[in-house]
Amino acid sequence: MNIETLKVFRDLVESGSFSKTAGLNYISQSAVSQQLKKLELVLKCRLFNRAANKLVLTVCGGKLYEGSKKIVALYDASMAEMKKLAAVKTADEIKISTIYSAGPYLVQDYIKKFMTVRPDIKISLEYRRFSQVYGDVSCGRSDFGFLACPYKKISGLVMAPVAQDEMVVIAGSGSPLCAKKNVAIRDLDGLDFVFFDKAFPSRRYIDGFFRKHGIKGNVRMELDNVDTIKTMVSSGVGVSILPQSTVRNMEKDGKLHVFRFSDAKVSRPLYLLHSKNRKLSLSAKLFMEMLTRQWRHNENKTA
């Protein structure tokens, strides 16, 4: 007894016709009859009775039909999944370029979540400067790019929002902010700051935020690396404003204090960048669909 024989039996029960069953299974009517006789011989019982030229299941036939339906359905579902997996070639990997301030934090979270569902898909992640991310996606070096606060649009590229990364104030243990329970926007006026370099879109976002609220700060250092900024802040050079995702669990060592704004919610947008003109692989489409679902879910929660 095999799956094909059970499928023929199921189709015969449901169609009630030897000719239709033969057509559904691409075999002759004689082959259908032979497989039915083989089943009855193996099971040592009749499966059908004929009544007015109709096929009527016996008790034994009814039991076999219920089991056949389940077995064939499970087999068909398994084969469909195998074909889907086979369509994703081993060499088919997702290549991602990301700015550093998003890569080790939010982007890696997305990748881990995706790979728990699709561990068969390979993902390559490379940390790049924001200007390089644009180039990587434009030339096809990467399937996707992750950017924060993009300041320009390029023809042929799509920028889709995928997250809002809350901005928080970080301060060393010796900062005057540590004496406060809450930090308001005005509390930042006149403080020493350690910031991203002026060329970074995230820095331009912060500068725009300061101008909007009339805040003036003393910029002590401008750096191009999140970890270096955190080191300088913990050593007392100044305070900073960074994405909350980059300072998770940093208060445990006591060197850094993290404050959310008490009078405003400040978030930088994170975007997924991809080409309009390049056809995405099945793997890449699945990854983008996951991000899109998560973005919509988060938006519905905050609506």
Image (cartoon, rainbow, N blue to C red):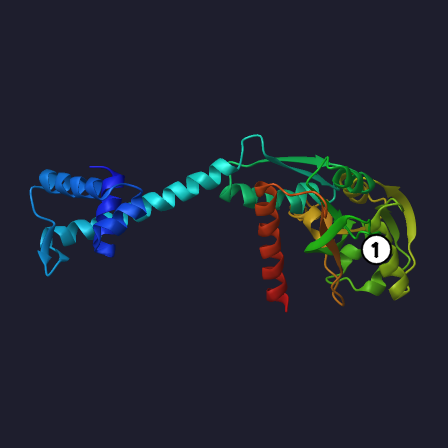
Q: Viewed as shown, does residue 193 lie left or right of 258?
A: right
Q: List x then y, in percent, for residue 281.
A: 61, 41
Of residues 68 and 123, the one nearer the viewer is 68
Question: In what quadrant of the picture does the N terminus appear?
Answer: top left
In the displayed image of the protein, which residue is found farthest to the top?
91
Residue 157: x, y in percent?
A: 76, 48
- Image quarter for residue 103? top right
Give the total of numbered labels: 1
Q: Residue at x 65, y 44 (%)?
A: 107
Residue 239 seen anywhere in this rendered image of the structure: no
Q: Is residue 219 something one can see in this rendering?
A: yes
Amino acid at the residue labelled 1: Tyr
Give residue 12's position: percent from left, percent from top: 22, 51
**SS at circle 1:** helix
Q: Position of residue 202 (x, y in %)?
A: 81, 50
Residue placed under numbered mark 1 in the picture? 205
Viewer-nearest residue: 239 or 25: 25
Q: Nearer the viewer, residue 55 or 115?
A: 55
How many neighbours does mark 1 have within 10 angstroms: few (below 14), some (14-19), or many (20 or more)? some
Relative to 100, say whether 290 is above or below. below
Q: Considering the image in quadrants, where does the C terminus appear?
A: bottom right
Residue at 24% in and 45% down: 8
